[in-house]
Image: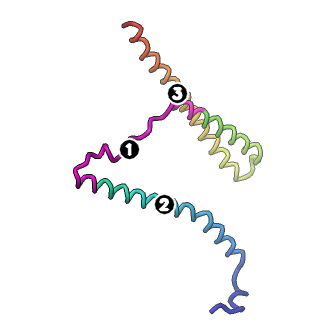
Amino acid sequence: MITPQCLAEVNLEALGHSLVILACVSPLILAGVVYYLKKRLDHRQIMAAIEKGIPLSEIIPTKPQLIGPAWIRYVSAGVAMVIIGLGLISCGGLGDPEVVVAFVVFGVGTGWLIRGMLNRKYYLQNKAAEETPKAEK
């Protein structure tokens, strides 16, 4: 039974922190449960199809093909993360420990930018190589 003495001993700050953590973790738990249930349903459908002798190509949908070259996504994400990283670095000051996050964002953005530039280079080379035999025929 909850008595007034018990309520007086409750640390409201700790209760508030617990509620914030629960609010942050609840969507992750819900997403995990939904993902698990979806995979379980997919597995049951596949097993039923195998028992009936239906080919799996009719049940499992094909993965959608990406539209456009991949280098565009890498370059645009890299530029965005570099800008965000530079903005966080300029706002934080170099003495704060939070700047580590800014340098990580900046580094990841630089990596994606380099990856996009390299993908573009090889994309253009492959595209040129595909077009030259067509012109010779």
The image shows residue 74, relative to residue 123, as above or below, that is below
The image shows residue 8, relative to residue 105, as above or below, that is below
Q: Looking at the picture, which amino acid does disc 2 mark?
A: Gly
The part of the chain drawn in magenta is 48-75
> Residue 13: where, in percent of width, then height?
72, 74
Q: Residue beneath label 1, please?
A: 61
Q: Quadrant of residue 47?
A: bottom left
> Tag on residue 118?
3
Left of 110 or right of it: where is 92? right
Q: Quadrant of residue 11?
A: bottom right
Closest to the camera, between mark 3 and mark 1, is 1
Q: Nearer the viewer, residue 4 or 110?
A: 4
Q: Looking at the picture, which amino acid does disc 1 mark?
A: Pro
The image shows residue 40, relative to residue 123, as above or below, that is below
Left of 50 or right of it: where is 20? right
The residue drawn where x is 59% and y is 41% is 108
